Each structure stands twice: as C-alpha cells, then as structure tokens.
Image: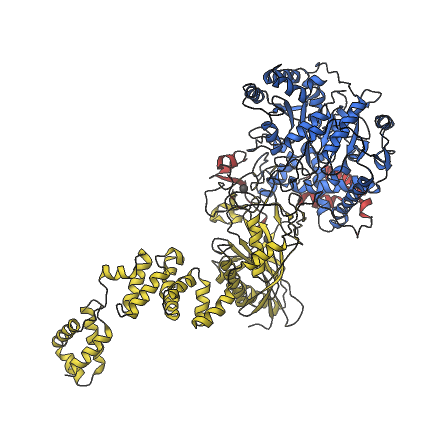
Chain colours: A blue, B red, C yellow
C-alpha cells in the first residue's frame, strides 16, 4: 500500500526513481483497466494530466505534491473543464475560473487526473443520485460507495488516484470513506476556501481529502488550507503544521465516546469493530443529548440553504435551457427537466421550511438546535480531547436498497452530521471489515482549529489498527 | 405533518418547479414524512436559545474598494443558452404586467 | 383640496459611487459596453462567493449619520429570495431585520420626516425589452446586461410622515442634497442612480390608515410630485364616491400623466428571508463609527444657515445655490477672490444657471470657474463692461473657457467711456436728427432714449450709457 501513497510517489519522483509522466500513465492505465467496474469518473483528464506531468519532469513545477495524481469531485470548478455537479442542469458548463483549493493543489504540484462522480449537487449518501448513473463500491460492485463524494472515495479505493478531493456537508467525505475503506477528512469550517465549490449548504460545506493514509490526508489538507480573501467565511488563523503532527502520538489525549452516536442505531458488526478499534485507549463515555435532534435540524438547514443556492440554475446564463414562450415558464421547465428527484425533494423541503409562517417552527428552530449541538460539543471538549464514534451506522448497502425511502437514506449521516453543524474537524479511518468483507470506518472529532491534534490521534490509531485489506478489482466489466 | 397537494403546488411555484399530478402526490407524501420527523424539533422549547447561523465567529470581513479584472464579455457569455447584442437573451418576461385602468 | 388626510412614505434606492461593486472587484462605472463589468461573483456563477466592499459599509454609515440615524453595533445581510432573470443568483443580498442604520430623521420644508432605516443591498442587472414599443408586455423577448448587477445600493425608508405631494418632493430634494454633499452617489434620477418609490394612502383626518398604493417609475423630482398628485386625486375620487382603494402597485406613466395598475401574476410574494450564510455579521467598531462621524462634510441645512448669516442671501437663492451641483463652489470661489456674495450669487443663480440648463451640463463641465466669475464681476464694477455686455462675455466664457478679460480684448467689447470720443458721436447724432432735437427741446424728454439708442448703435453697444445720458442732456439743453 505504501508504494501508492502520495507521500511515497512524491518522494520517488523527487529522488529520481520514477517520473511524473510514468506515474500519471500508470494511473491512467489503471483507470482504463478497472473504472468500467466502478465508474468513479465523469471525465478523465488524460491530456492535461500528461502535460502537467511533463512540466513536473522538466522541473517547472515543484512542491510537496509534485507529480501526484489527484481526482477531483465534480463539484469543484476548474477553468475550461466541464463541471456538472452530477446534474443534467449543468451538463456542458465550463467555468471560466478555478476553485481556490484546486488551484493551490496544482501550485503544490498535484496533477488533476479526472472529475469524479457524485450525488447530484452533493445531495445523497450513495452516489446513486447522479444524473450520469451510479458509482459502484470497489469492494463489492453490487454495493454503493456511499456519498455524496462516492466517486472520489471509490477512485482512491480502486487505486485510480492516490488521493482525491470531496466535499462534506453532512458527512459526504467521511461516510463514503468509511464505506470504501479509505481515509476521509472534513476540516474545520472555514479552513479550506469554498471559492469555486458549487454550494449545497453554504454554512455546512467544507472541502476535504480522501487518501489511503492519515499522513496523505494531512499533506493534501496542508496544501490547500489557509486564508482566502475570496471567501468571507475563510478563517485567518494559521494552519500550523498538520503534517508534522503525524507521529506525535496520543500521550495525554483523553478520548471520549459519544453515547448518542454509538447506540442502537449502529449495526452490531460495526459496533463490535468500533469497540475493538478503540480498545486500550481508555476512552470515557459522554452523553450529548442534543445529538438526538441533530439529524432533524440538518435536514431543515441544509435544504433551506440549498433551495436558495440552487435558485440560480434557471436557464438564463448557463447550463440547460428548455425553451418556452415566457421566462417564468422557461425557468420552470428547465428546472423540472434539469434536476433529479432528490434535488427537487430538498428544494421543496427547503422552500417550505423558509416560507412565511413556517420559518420560526422549522428553520429558526433548527438553528437553535444547532446552538445546542455546538454547546454540547463545547462541554464534551472540556473533558475530552478527541471524540469517537463509528463513521456510518452500517457498512455499504446494496444498490437500490434505500432509494425508495429518503428517511432511511438520511439515517446514513447520523454520526457525521453533528460535526458539520458545529463546524469542527473530523476524520474517518478504516477500522476493519464486516463478515461480507465490506469496510467499517471509525470517526475522530476534534475541537475547531485542532486539526493537528486530529491528525496526530488518527495516525496513531491507524498504526494500532493496522488495516491493510484491499479491494480486488478484476477489470472484467466494460 | 400533513402536506396537501395544494401545499406542494404552492411551494413548487415559489421554487419554479413544474410538477405533474403524480409528482405532486409523491412529494406530498415525501415532504409529509420528512416534516413529521423534523416536527419533533418544532416542539422543543428553545425560546431561551440563540439561533446559530454560522459555525464560526468571524465578523467585519471586508475587502478594499479596489478593481479586480473582470471577465471578457466573450467569457461572460460563453455559456449563455442564448445571446444577442452581447447580452443574455431570454423569452419575454411576464412576472408583472400592466393591466391598465 | 379633498377632506382627506394624505399619508405618504417614501423608499429611496441610491447607487453608491464606489470604485467597485458591492461584493466583487468589478468596476462600478455607468455606461460601459454590455457585460464587460462582470465576473463569476456578479454573474452568480456556481461556486462564486461575495465579499463585502468596505467603502460601501463606510458610505452606508455616513448616510445614516447624516440622516440622524443610529448606526447598528451589529447587523446582518439576509437573502431575499425571488426569481427574476436580471438577478443573477435569483436572490438579492439585502438587509432585513438588522439594518446598518435605523431610527433617524430629516428636516425638510413642510415638516420633519422620520427615517425608519437605511440599509445596504445590491442592484440587479438591466433588461431591455425587444419588440413593439419596447414595453414589457408587448415584448417578444428581453436582453440582459449584468453590468449593473451587484452595484452597491443604499435603501432609505421613511416613516409615513409625509403629508402631501409637495412635502414628498421637498423630502426627496433635501435627501438628494444631503447625499450629494456626502459625495457618495451621483444621485441622478434620470440615470437611475437615485430611485424613489412612494406609498400613498388617504384617511379621514386623525382616523385609521387607509389602504396604501405603491407608485413606482418616477424619474424626476417633478414626476414624483405629479404622480403623487394624480394618485391623491384618484384615491380621493374613489373614496368620495363610496368606492374603495385596492392595495396594489401602480406605475407612473410620464407620457400620459397617469398611474397604471401593475398586476402581479404570482400570489403575494414570499421572499423567504434568511441570514446570508456566505457572509459574516457586520459589527462596525465604535472607533470606525467615530472616525466617520468626525470627518462628516458640512450638511446642506447647516450650510444654508451659514449662507443666510454670512452672505445675507434670500431663502430662494440659498435653495438654488445648494440644490445645483457646483453652483455654491463657484460662488464661494468668487467670494474668496473679493467678489460681493450677493453679486456673485445673482450671476450664478441667474445667467449661469440658465446657460447650464440650456446646454444640459453641470457647472464643472462649463468653461466658467470662480476665478473667472470674479474677474467678470470686477469688469462690471470698474465700468469696463455694461451688464448687457457682461452677459454676452459670460456666454463666451462658459462656451470656450477663455478668461473674461481675454474675451473682452478679442471681441473689442470694452465699454467706450472716453469723453471726447463720445462727445463727437453725440454731436453728430444731434446734428443728423434736427427734428427730434427740436421736439426734445420743446419738452418731449422721453426722446433722450432715442438719442442714447442711436449712440449705442453707433458704438455697437459699447458706449457707456450713463456717460451718454449726461452728454445728450447737456448737449440738447444748449
Ligand atoms: Mg430594496
Ligand atoms: Zn463582478
């Protein structure tokens, strides 16, 4: 596994054992061989990736990630490259600008190798809501990879790219990381600029990395984090030295298990793997009662913001247009044809929650619950340095299993949502597999801005757990 | 929480969506189910709790009043579904109409 | 005059004349070619984010202070959600229940008007309706230019304290004067940089408020008054005849001098306001508020008081001087160079203003300045120019920018006061007109004008009339 990490690739290119061109070619070949099984990519950027590799090999581009291929969730803008957000309404849209996070990674030498599939506008937990068909789990192609960043999680799990980017609004990085047996990290809200990230729910969205190792996650995070004047919600604080934190160990760190995230809703096999993964940490227990309402609050706040963020897809300036005799009819037809059912459901829900007469009972109340969740975290972090839970209540479910029941699907995010509501950093690392061989994830949460502590603890647990299973992809499908 | 087909039609209109009858029925059920779940929090007594709009405590994020490069009009219009005279073209606008005296 | 009491409230939208737009670095310049001042932010492209222009916040506070408002220690931007093709995001970033300034007043002729609030928001793009007559409902399609989208606006909302159309005009005029003195806006109603909407209702004296009607589309102060006069009479007639007023929005039509009902096709607007999650709260520090307060320019009211006292001008002169751009500066500069204030003011509010209006230019665009006005007054005072000639010189100065002395020289306009030269001319005229001389001597004294007129003709208007009067009087009595 270590041969395929970003750190190792960058080192061997730096030391002349291989070239960026060879690395990119090998990954393009692997995509060619097995992406038919997984369908992680919406577009493979072979041409531009090889050009960038040449520049690295010519010494024109240096940096901690020089020559490292990276897969980009198709919710991030790259100038001149189609950005669809998994939606028909944006098919063919080529943004005239590049997201800050992507730009910084490219400046650090990373090579975008493709745009990955996702639930439409990041709304979903299975990547089945893509207008361009589902992505399949590399561990078992009858199962979902999780979502909404399922393409980015699957791309790393399948070896198509050593690292990738996702976005996490209610667990959209950590949950698919858990289901695909890779590392997935959501930074503190405001650490990574959202400029160029197509918004789902602005007060919850964060960009974060997928990788095989905690160290790689820290390297990618460090390369893109930090203040951006183009994002008003970007934090001015120094990012510190997250990569240097790897190896600091866990001495003195007090671990707490959140009882509300480790109870009956958790599948027994997941609970058992979680228990054995944290054995020997001396973790205490902490009850955070507001978490019982976090899911409900989330499913009011996120759709409310989304209903407004997605209003601009109206057929006037870009994307799909279905013509009609007047502009109102054109907008309605365009949106009706361009959005899939889950997006419409959330737009409806959010519009309703904000509409006159319901605001206080729904949106206003959800914002108050948000305060309670943040307060509960605050209390818990007085006694504990890192909070623990399973990442997902279940392992990967079958394709189609939850598509007819939105509420069942929403429960996938039970354990990940509180960190988004409070804006704190969290990471999911692989903690084992279930009896069907499907990966199980463990979530660590730290106080806002404590990414260094989060990476240090996660790296230590990663070593203790020693997860080294790999999906076996035959490359049979085409 | 019962959501009627008329509620759905009204909200769809606000959201510029255009549902057929089957969709109206389906969304009435889905929204009803989800709001049923959400209504648990509507019942909480949180009068003393301040709402949180943002997870972070930043304020006064301002930029200096300095020019930055704009797009070229070609870039601005490159993705336009219809354009004319360097402007975005739309069908006639009927949001408000004059009805006379 | 009807037996009803008129109640009017006015909402004024003012475009700030900052360098850049409210939330992006695009130029805020009027009249650029279509869609040249646009970027991902003001086009509402997916993934773009707004960042507040500090100058707009300062200008908003300045306006609030000038209007005797309280400046909020904390305020928020909200999203106002509604679909309209000239609004790129399909929501407007505005302020809702926490505006930056509130609770002020403005003293105007006719009585004090309360200011409910002054808040920040962004302008929309501009649609052109193509088809028969260019009117919205006759159009076949519309074309949109987003140059204006995102221009900073301050919306100033008055209390319903305005008692009639003339009072409304006085309020809008004084507001414009105040804004102009702050140098925060062009405040040109014709160009739309200041836009007034008025709410008007009638009631029995001291009774309950009547049903109000909103009137829009007035593009001059005069049409504001005319539209309100029309609407006041229309409502009075309805009420007199036992009918009721319908709550609605009506558009003023300058051409036919009437207001026309605009029907909204949608049911009542439901703007679904919620706090803008892409922006953080504004909490201007006290030090900044104090800095602005202490650097306020002189406001029109205090300037008027000073002019009345120092220069002994009439109310009407003061009003004109302070209402027309650049006029007061012109007079002040002339006075500084020793011209008598009343003389300079007479010129400024008389011939100078008339010429500016004829040419349709502002004072600073004409060839005249305070220095030249002082010179002109001096040429009259020392007898070089008659008032009549001076008016002629003024026109040339304003058109060419030459100095008055230079004009007098070039055109040979200096008054002929030389006694012997004039005496020769008078002699000849008396000799050439013996009949008239006879009649004068017989007591027809009004013929003196005839002789002076002949002399003026002979000198092409340059003869000193006083000198000529005396010359003829003595010659004819010989
Ligand atoms: Mg407004
Ligand atoms: Zn712009």
Which of these two is toward me, A49 or A16?
A: A16
Residue A168 coordinates in the image, percent (x, y): 71, 34
Residue C158 coordinates in the image, percent (x, y): 60, 61
Q: Considering the image in quadrants, where does the N terminus of chain C appear?
A: bottom right
Which of these two is toward me, A29 or C384?
A: C384
C276 on left or right of A385: left
Q: Is residue B47 above or below residue A273?
A: below
Residue at x 70% of width, y 14% of height: A475
Residue C25 coordinates in the image, percent (x, y): 53, 42
> Tag count in the figure?
0
Which of these two is toward me, A220 or C439?
A: A220
Q: Is residue C449 above or below residue A307?
A: below
Residue C474 visible at all: yes
Q: Which residue in the rendered view is the most extreme toward the bottom?
A: C442
Residue A117 visible at all: no
Q: Considering the image in quadrants, where does the C terminus of chain C appear?
A: bottom left
Q: Is residue C271 above or below residue A12?
A: below
Residue at x 44% of width, y 72% of height: C314
Residue C245 coordinates in the image, percent (x, y): 62, 63
| Residue A334 placement: quadrant | top right
| Residue A126 placement: quadrant | top right
A86 on left or right of C416: right
């Amino acid at each position: 596994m270590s041969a395929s990490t970003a750190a190792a690739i960058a080192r061997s290119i730096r030391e002349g054992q291989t070239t960026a061109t060879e690395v990119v070619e090998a990954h393009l070949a692997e995509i060619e061989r097995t992406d038919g099984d997984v369908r992680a990519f919406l577009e493979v950027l072979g041409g531009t990736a090889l050009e960038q590799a040449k520049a690295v090999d010519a010494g024109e581009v240096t940096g901690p990630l020089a020559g490292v291929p990276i897969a980009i969730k198709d919710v991030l803008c790259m100038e001149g490259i189609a950005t669809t957000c998994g939606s028909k309404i944006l098919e063919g849209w080529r943004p005239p600008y590049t997201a800050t996070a992507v730009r910084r990674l490219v400046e650090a030498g990373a090579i975008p190798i493709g745009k990955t599939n996702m639930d439409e506008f990041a709304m979903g937990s299975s990547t089945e809501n893509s207008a361009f068909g589902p992505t399949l789990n590399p561990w078992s192609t009858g199962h979902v990879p999780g979502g909404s960043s399922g393409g980015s999680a699957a791309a790393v799990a399948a070896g198509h790219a050593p690292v990738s980017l996702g976005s996490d609004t209610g667990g959209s990085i950590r949950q698919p990381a858990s289901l695909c047996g890779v590392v997935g990290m959501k930074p503190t809200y405001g650490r990574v600029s959202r400029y160029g990230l197509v918004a789902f729910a602005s007060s919850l969205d964060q960009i974060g990395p997928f990788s095989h190792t905690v160290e790689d996650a820290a390297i990618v995070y460090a390369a893109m984090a930090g203040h951006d004047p183009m994002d008003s919600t970007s934090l001015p604080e120094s990012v510190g030295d997250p990569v240097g934190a790897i190896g600091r160990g866990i001495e003195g760190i007090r671990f707490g298990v959140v009882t509300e995230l480790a109870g009956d809703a958790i599948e027994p096999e997941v609970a058992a793997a979680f228990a054995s993964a944290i054995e020997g940490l001396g973790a205490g227990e902490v009850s955070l009662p507001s978490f019982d309402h976090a899911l409900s609050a989330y499913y009011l706040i996120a759709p409310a913001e989304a209903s407004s963020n997605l209003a601009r897809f109206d057929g006037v300036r870009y994307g799909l247009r279905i013509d009609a005799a007047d502009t109102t009819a054109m907008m309605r037809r365009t949106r009706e044809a361009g959005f899939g059912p889950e997006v419409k459901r959330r737009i409806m829900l959010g519009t309703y929650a904000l509409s006159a007469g319901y605001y206080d009972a729904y949106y206003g109340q959800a914002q108050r619950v948000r305060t309670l969740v943040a307060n509960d975290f605050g209390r818990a972090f007085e006694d504990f340095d890192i909070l623990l839970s399973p990442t997902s209540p279940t392992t990967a479910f079958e394709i189609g299993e939850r598509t007819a029941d939105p509420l069942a699907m929403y429960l996938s995010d039970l354990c990940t949502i509180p960190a988004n509501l409070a804006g704190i950093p969290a990471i999911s690392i692989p903690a084992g597999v279930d009896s069907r061989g499907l990966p199980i994830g463990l979530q660590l949460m730290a106080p806002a801005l404590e990414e260094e502590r989060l990476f240090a603890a996660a790296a230590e647990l990663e070593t203790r757990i020693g997860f080294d299973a790999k999906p076996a992809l035959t490359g049979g499908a085409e | 929480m019962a959501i009627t087909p008329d509620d759905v039609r009204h909200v769809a209109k606000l959201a510029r969506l255009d549902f057929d009858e089957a969709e109206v029925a389906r969304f009435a059920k889905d929204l009803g189910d989800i709001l049923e779940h959400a209504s648990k929090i509507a019942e909480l007594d949180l009068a003393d709790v301040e709402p949180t709009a943002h997870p972070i405590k930043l304020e006064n994020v301002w930029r200096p009043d300095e020019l930055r490069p704009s797009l070229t009009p070609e870039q601005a219009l490159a993705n336009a579904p219809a354009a004319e005279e360097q402007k975005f073209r739309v069908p006639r606008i009927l949001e408000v109409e004059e009805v006379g005296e | 005059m009807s037996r009803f009491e008129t109640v009017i409230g006015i909402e004024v939208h003012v475009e700030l004349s900052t360098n850049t737009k409210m939330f992006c670095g695009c130029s805020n310049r009027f009249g650029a070619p279509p869609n040249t001042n646009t970027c991902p932010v003001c086009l509402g492209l997916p993934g773009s984010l707004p960042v507040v222009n500090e100058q707009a916040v300062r200008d908003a506070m300045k306006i609030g202070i000038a209007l005797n408002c309280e400046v909020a220690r904390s305020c928020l931007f909200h999203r106002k959600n509604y679909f309209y093709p000239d609004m790129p995001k399909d929501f407007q970033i505005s302020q809702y229940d926490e505006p930056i300034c509130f609770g002020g007043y403005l003293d105007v002729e006719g009585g004090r008007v309360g200011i409910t609030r002054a808040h920040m928001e962004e302008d929309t793009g501009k649609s052109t309706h193509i088809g028969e007559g260019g009117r919205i409902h006759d159009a076949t399609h519309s074309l949109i230019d987003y140059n204006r989208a995102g221009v900073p606006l301050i919306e100033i909302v008055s209390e319903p304290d305005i008692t009639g159309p003339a009072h409304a005009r006085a309020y809008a005029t004084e507001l414009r004067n105040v804004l102009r003195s702050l140098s925060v806006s062009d405040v040109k109603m014709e160009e739309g940089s200041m836009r007034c909407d008025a709410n008007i209702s009638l009631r029995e004296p001291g009774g309950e408020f009547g049903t109000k009607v909103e009137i829009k589309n007035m593009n001059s102060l005069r049409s504001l008054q005319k539209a309100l006069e029309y609407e006041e009479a229309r409502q009075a007639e309805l009420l007199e005849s036992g009918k009721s007023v319908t709550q609605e929005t009506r558009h003023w039509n300058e051409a036919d001098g009437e207001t026309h009902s605009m029907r909204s096709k949608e049911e009542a607007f439901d703007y679904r306001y919620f706090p803008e999650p892409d922006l953080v709260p504004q909490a201007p520090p006290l030090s900044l508020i104090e800095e602005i307060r202490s650097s306020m320019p002189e406001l029109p009211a205090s300037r008027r008081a000073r002019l009345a006292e120092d220069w002994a001008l009439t109310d009407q002169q003061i009003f004109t001087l302070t209402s027309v751009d650049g006029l007061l500066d012109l007079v002040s500069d002339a006075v500084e160079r020793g011209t008598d204030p009343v003389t300079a003011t007479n010129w400024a509010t008389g011939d100078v203003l008339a010429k500016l209006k004829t040419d349709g230019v502002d004072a600073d665009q004409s060839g005249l300045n305070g220095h030249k006005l002082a010179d002109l007054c001096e040429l009259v005072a020392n007898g070089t120019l008659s008032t009549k000639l001076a008016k002629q010189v003024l026109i040339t100065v304003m058109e060419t920018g030459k100095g008055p002395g230079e004009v007098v020289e070039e055109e040979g306009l200096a008054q002929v006061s030389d006694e012997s030269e004039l005496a020769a001319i008078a002699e000849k005229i008396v000799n050439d007109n013996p009949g008239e001389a006879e009649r004068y001597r017989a007591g027809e004294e009004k013929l003196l004008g005839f002789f002076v007129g002949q002399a003026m003709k002979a000198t092409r208007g340059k003869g000193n009339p006083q000198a000529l009067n005396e010359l003829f009087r003595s010659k004819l009595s010989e």
